[in-house]
Amino acid sequence: MKFFPWFCLLFFPGHAQYSDTLKRTELEEVVVTGQFEPQSVRRSVYQVRTIPMEQFAQRGATRLQDVLNTQLNIRFSQDLALGGSNLSLQGLSGQNVKVLIDGMPMVGRQGTSNEININQINIQSIERIEIVEGPMSVIYGADALAGVINIITRKADEDELQVTARVHEESAGREYSLRAGLHMQQVGAAYAKGPFHIRGDFTHNNFKGWKGSATGREMQWHPKQQLMGSLITGIRKNELSVHYRADLTFEDIYNPGEFEGGEALDQNYYTTRLMQQLQGNIKAGEKWMFNPAFSHTAYERQTQSVIVNQSTGSRTLSLGEGHQDITRFNGFTFRPTGTWKKSTALSLQPGMEVNYEAGSGGRIKEGVQSIADFALFLSAEWKAGRALWIRPAVRTMYNTVYSSPPIVPSVNIKAEINEKSDVRFAYGRGFRAPSIRELYFDFFDASHAIEGNTELQPELSHSFNVSWNYRPVWAGRYRSTITATAFYNTINNMIDFGQKPGNNLVTTYLNIDHFKTTGFTINQNLYSMHWDFSIGGGVTGRYNQLRDDYAAVPEFVWSPEVNASAVYRSPNNKLNISLYYKFTGRTPYYRLEDNGNGGQEPRLQQTGSFHWADLTTGYSLGKHITLSGGIRNLFDVIWVNNTGSTGGAHSSSGPRPIGNGRSYFFNLTYSFNQKSNNQ
C-alpha cells in the first residue's frame, strides 16, 4: 500500500490529496531562448524543455545524440558513410529545425538552412540545452518552423578556479581493444576574477569503427576521429557584459574500400569548422537593454580518395569523377536586439537580423553561390491582467533570391488557470527560401547522381501549438509535473528529395504540394528527495500530398512513441543510478515510385519500430574523482527494416541503421573547483 498514493498521482492526479502547507518546490530553471531577459521556465510564454549538464553525466554521454535520442518528438536518421546524425522534430526534418549555439546559428556540410550534424558539437562545453517546440520563425528566421534547439555553453562563475578532466572508454558492440571501440579524452579549465572570466575545453574522440557483419576491409560503421576545442572569454561589470567565443572542430572519417582486381578505393572525409561569436549585453537604467551579437562560421569539407594497391600497399590519388572535392561555406550573422520595458505590464523588443551565406566547391554549380536575407522584427509582451500574457510579433524580410511575404506574424499566449496549472498557445507563419545546396548542388560519380534544382519555390507554412502544464504535489514529499502538448503544421511547397522528372536515374530536390504533420504528447515527471521518475508518450501523423492529382493518398499516417526514465541518488549523494528508455513505433510514409508504365505513383513504405535503453551508474570517490559505467543500447539494436509496398513493377526495401549494437562504457572524471572567497 506504500506505493498506492504515488500510483494514484501518476495516473489519476485529480484524485490525489495535496498538502496546503507545502509551497511548490519545482526547480526554477532559468531559460534565455526567445526571452526578453533570462527568466524561469514557468514564467516563459514559450513552452521550453531544458536538459541540464547533470543529465549528460547520468547518460555517460559522449555526443549530443546520446542525450536527445530518448526525448519525445525528436528522432534521428543515421548516415553510415559520413558518420552523421540528422534530427527531426514534430515530424519535420532538420531544415525546419534551427540549431543554435548561444543563440547564433550553426553551419553544417549543407549550409545553414539544412540539417546540422549535432554530433560535431563539443559536449564538454555545454551547460544545458533549451528546446522550444513550435513556430519560432519570426524571432529566429525561416528555418525555425518546427522549433529551436539552443545549446547554452558553460562560462566561468564569479571568482572561480575550475579544472576538469575525463577519460571515457567504450566498446563498439562486442568489439573493444586499443584498435577497436571508442576512446575519448576531455580536459577543461575555467577562471574568473573580478570582471574577467575565461574558459577553455578540449575533446578528443577516437572511434575505431565497427566491423559488425562486414567482411574484408569494409566496416559497417566507419572509423572517425574528432578534435574539438572551445574558448570563451569576456568581462562582466555592472550593467555591461561582453564575451568572445570560438569553437574549432576537426573531423576525419575513414571509409576503407574492398579490393577488386588488386585495387581498393579508400576515402577520407575531412571536416574543419571555425565558429566565432562576439556578443554583448548593455543595460541602460531599469527600462532599456541592448544585445548586439555577431557570428562568423568558416566551414570546409574535403573528400580525398586514394587507390590502394593490394600487392605493394602503395597509395595514389584517384582521378575519378567526384573523388576529390573541397566544399566550403562561409556564414555571417549580425543580430542586434533591444528591449524597452515600458511598464510592468508591457515590454517591447525590436530587432534586426542580417544573414549571409556563400558556398563553393566541386559540388556547387558554377563556382561561388551566395544567398543573403535582411529582416526586421518587433515583438511585444503584454501582461493583460493577473494571469494572462500575450506576445505578438511580426517580421518583415528581404531575400536576395526569392520574394518573401511582406509580413510574417506570430502570437504566443500564456494563461494561468490557477497556481498549479497553465495553458500556452502559439501560432506562427513561416517562410523558407531554398538553400544553396538545394538550388546548386551538383554531385555525379559512379554511384551518385544528385543535382540541385534552381526551379524550386520557397516554402510557406502555418504552425499551431498548444500545451497544458499541471504541477500537483502530494503529502509534502513529492513534486510532480504533467505536460500535454498538441501541434499542427502545414507547409506548401515543402522541399524534399525525389526523382528528376523525365530522368529517373537522377535524384534532385522537388517541391511537395502540401505537407502536414500533427500529433500530441503527454509526459509526467515525479520527483522526490532521492528518486526522479518520468513517463510519457505521443503520436505523430504525417501527410505528404506529393502532387495534387494524388488525392487518393490518406490524409495522415501515424507513428507512436513512448519514453520513460528513472534516476536514483543515494542519501549521501555518492551513488547514482539512471535508466533511460524510448520506444519508437513504426513510421509509415508515401513515396513516388515507377509504376512500370513510364509513370509514377505513390507507394506506402514503412520504417520498423525499435526499443532503445541506456543504463548508467556512477560513484563519487571523495570530492574530486567520480567513476561511472554502464550499458548503452540495452536491446542491442543494429538495424530496422524499411519496407515498400508489394506489387507493381517495383518495391523498395532495405535496412535502416540505428546503432552499432549493445556497448559497454567506463568513465573516470576528475574535477577541482575552488572559490576565491574560500581561499
Image: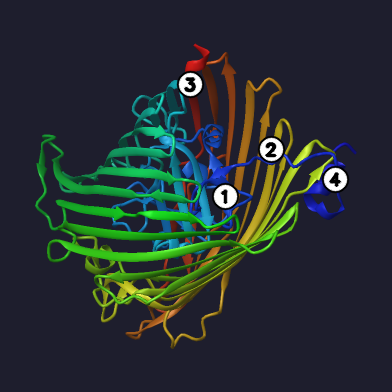
Q: Is residue 530 above or below residue 85?
A: above
Q: Nearer the viewer, mark 3 or mark 4?
A: 4
Q: Nearer the viewer, residue 330 or 499?
A: 330
Q: CA distance from mark 1 to mark 4?
A: 26 Å
Q: CA distance from mark 3 to mark 4?
A: 42 Å
Q: Which residue is mark 1?
A: 49
* Amino acid tagged 1: Arg
Judge the density around disc 2: few (<14), some (14-19), many (≥20) Cα neighbours within 10 Å.
some
Question: In the current view of this chain or complex, which residue is farthest to the right?
Answer: 1
Q: Residue furthest front?
A: 285
Image-quadrant location for residue 163: top left
Compare marks 2 and 3 and give the one earlier in the sequence.
Answer: 2
Do tag 1 and tag 2 residues touch (Cβ < 8 Å)? no
* Residue type at the position of mark 2: Asp
First in sequence: mark 2 vs mark 4:
4
User: On the image, numbered disc 3 is attached to which residue?
Assistant: 668
Inter-mark Cα distance, 3 to 1: 29 Å
Mark in the foreground, 3 or 1 = 1
Q: Is residue 406 left or right of residue 478?
A: left
Mark 3 belongs to which amino acid? Answer: Leu
Q: Is residue 298 left or right of residue 483?
A: left
Q: Secondary structure at mark 3?
A: strand
Q: How many marks?
A: 4
Which image quarter: residue 367?
bottom left
Residue 110 in view here = yes
Query: Residue tagged by mark 2?
Result: 532
- Horizontal placement of 168 versus 52: left or right? left
Left or right: where does residue 109 sit relative to residue 554? Answer: left
Task: Say which element carries label 1.
Answer: strand
Q: CA distance from mark 2 to mark 4?
A: 19 Å
Q: Report if residue 210 is visible in the image.
A: no
